Image (tube, rainbow, N blue to C red):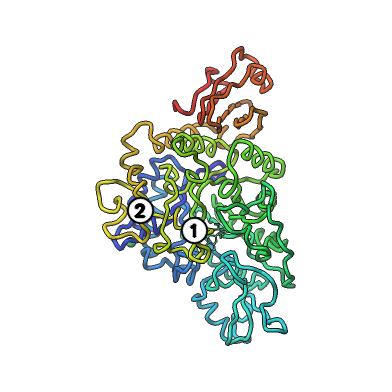
Amino acid sequence: TTESSWWRGAVIYQIYPRSFADSNHDGIGDINGITEKLDYISDLGVDGIWLSPFFTSPMKDFGYDISDYRDVDPMFGTLSDLDNLISKAHALNLKVMIDQVISHTSDQHPWFIESRKDTINDKADWYVWAEPQADGTPPNNWLSVFGGSAWTWEPARKQFYLHNFLNSQPDLNFHNPAVVSQLLDDMRFWLERGVDGFRLDTANFYFHDSELRNNPPRPKNLAAGGDMSNDVNLYSMQSHIYDKSRPENIGFLKQLRSLMNEYDGRTTVGEIGDDHSLKLMAEYTSGGDKLHMAYTFDLLAHDSGAEYLESVIDSTESMIGDGWPCWAMSNHDVMRVATRWADGENQQHLIKLLHAILFSLRGSVCLYQGEELGLPEADIPFEQLQDPYGITFWPEFKGRDGCRTPMPWNSTDNHAGFSQNTPWLPIPSEHMDLTVEQQSAHEDSVLNHCKALLSWRQRSPTLVKGEIERLEAPEGILAFHRHLDEHRVTLVFNLSNQTKLIGEELLHKWGLDDYSASLPIHAFDGAWLEHDGDNNWVNFSQL
Ligand code: TEU
Ligand code: CA
C-alpha cells in the first residue's frame, strides 16, 4: 500500500535533541521541548522526524554511547514523555524515526561491565576481545575513527577490546548470535512502542574481520565518489582505519528486515561511511530484503559544484537498481552545508538553490534542524568545545560542535528562545539574525522558500518517486528530468556565479522541441518545467 511505503521519497527532519528546545530550562534540549515544537515541524511540510539518541547514556559521545537501549536518559525526559511525543506526532501525521546505535555500546552498559571482568562470564564473548602481540602491543594496526589505536587494554582480562570510536564505546561482537538476537529484541521493544523506523548508526561497521588481519595502508587521495576524504573530517589522515563493511553484514541486515516486515509501514535508513559507500548503499538497499534506504557522506562531506553533483547522481544511478537512496547535505557530524558550499555574500541564494536540488533528487531526504534556516556553521573557540573528536584533533579538525549549536527560535527571549538558562553550547551571534521568528515574518526568507519547495515537492508524485535522467549541460549547470509514467519534469540549476544561457539546440536535445528561444538562468537560480502543465519555465527564486 501507499501508506506502508511512505518512506519512499519522504523528507525526514533530523532533530538533535540536546539542541532543539529546552522545556525545563537546564540549558539542554529535551523530549518535551521537541513535543512543544511539533506544530512548527509539521508546518514545514516534512513527512517525519528522526530523533538523534535520547537513550540512557554517560554522554561521552553525546548519546551515541548507550548504556540502556530501552530507556530515555533523565536529561531528556522519560519514556512517557516519549510516548506523548510519538502520539502527538502521529496526530499531526508525522512519522517518528529513532536512532539505533548498535555497533557499539557505552562502556557503562551492564553487558560491558560484565564482559570486561574476566574471560568466563556470561557476556565474555559479547564484545571483541583479543590477545596482545608477543611484544605486548595491540593485536593489529586498526585505528579508531576518533584517533589512536582501535584497541584498548583491559587489565582485568589481560586482553584488548576493540572500539571504532572512543575507547568508552566498545564494539559489540556481531559474530556472536546471542548478541544479534538481543539487539533485535531491543529493536522490537521500540517497534512495539510505535516508532515508524530506525536510523541505523554506522550500519556498515557492525562486523569486524574475525581473523583480525592488518589493514593495508590507505591511499591518500581518494577520487570523488569515495567519502570522508576531504578537510571536513579526518578519515584521510588515518592510514588504516578500522576494518568494516564485511560481507557477513548482509546476513544481519536480512534478519533485521524480517523483523521490520513483521510490522506494517516501518522503515530503516542506514548510515554508510566507507570509501565505496555509494556501492554499499546500492547493495544494502536493493532486493527488498535488507535496508529500506541508506545515506552516505557523498553530499555531506565532499566537493561542491555542478560537476560533482553530476558524478554523484551518475554513480548512484548506475548502481542503485531497485535500491533507494536517502540524501542529506547537513547533519550533526559535518560542517553545515551553508558554510561548506556557500560563496560569501551569495550564501542565502546558494542555500535556496541547494534546498531545491536536495528536494529534487531521486530518493528520500534528511533535512537537519537549522538547515531550513540556512544556518552557517558556528565557530566555537577551543575552550568551549564539547566534542571529544574535535578536542583530540584541534586545530586541523575542529570537531562537530559547530553544527550542533542550539536552534535560534527568536531574538527577543534570552538565549534565542531555546532556553532560559545558558545553553550547553553557545548560540553564535550570526544566528540571531536568522531566527525562526524573523524568517517567518519575511516572505523571501530561506525558511519560507524552503517551505514553499517542500509543498511543491509534496504535490508532485514525480518529484517524490519518479526516475531521474541526467542531461548534458554547460559548465556550472546541473540539469535532469524526473519521470513518472507519462509525466515529466525538467529541472535546471545554475551553481555558477554567472548567468547562463541554455541554447535552443540544447533544449531540443533534451527533448524540449517546442522551444525556439534560449533559456537564461541567473547565477544561483534554477528553473523547472512541468510538461503537462502550461509549459512555462518557473524560476526557483520566484517560488
Ligand atoms: O557517525 C559515524 C561516522 O562515520 C562519523 O564518525 C563520521 O565519520 C564523522 O562524524 C564525520 O565527521 C555516527 C554518528 O553519527 C556520530 O555522531 C557518532 O559519533 C558515531 O557514529 C559513533 O557512534
Ligand atoms: Ca532540558
In front of the other: label 2 or label 1? 1
- Residue at the spot 70% in from the left edge and 74% down from the top edge: 140
Residue designated by label 1: 398
Is there CB contact under 8 Å for labels 2 and 1? no
- The outermost residue toward the front is 395
Mark 1: amino acid: Lys
Residue nearer the viewer, 196 or 470: 470
In which quadrant will I find the N terminus? top right
Image quarter where ligand 2 lies: bottom left
> Could you tell me residue 444's position as x and y percent?
38, 31
The quarter of the picture where residue 126 lies is bottom right
Q: Which mark is residue 1?
A: none
- Residue at the spot 51% in from the left edge and 66% down from the top edge: 392
Residue designated by label 2: 427
Q: Is residue 358 above or below residue 193?
A: above
Q: In whole angstroms, how far apart are the C-alphas of marks 2 and 1?
A: 17 Å
- Residue at the spot 50% in from the left edge and 29% down from the top edge: 525
* Viewer can see residue 306: yes
> Could you tell me residue 37's position as x and y percent?
35, 49
> Could you tell me residue 53's position as x and y percent?
47, 61
In which quadrant will I find the C terminus? top left
> Could you tell me residue 500's position as x and y percent?
57, 24
Mark 2: amino acid: Ile
CB of residue at label 1: within 8 Å of ligand 1?
A: no
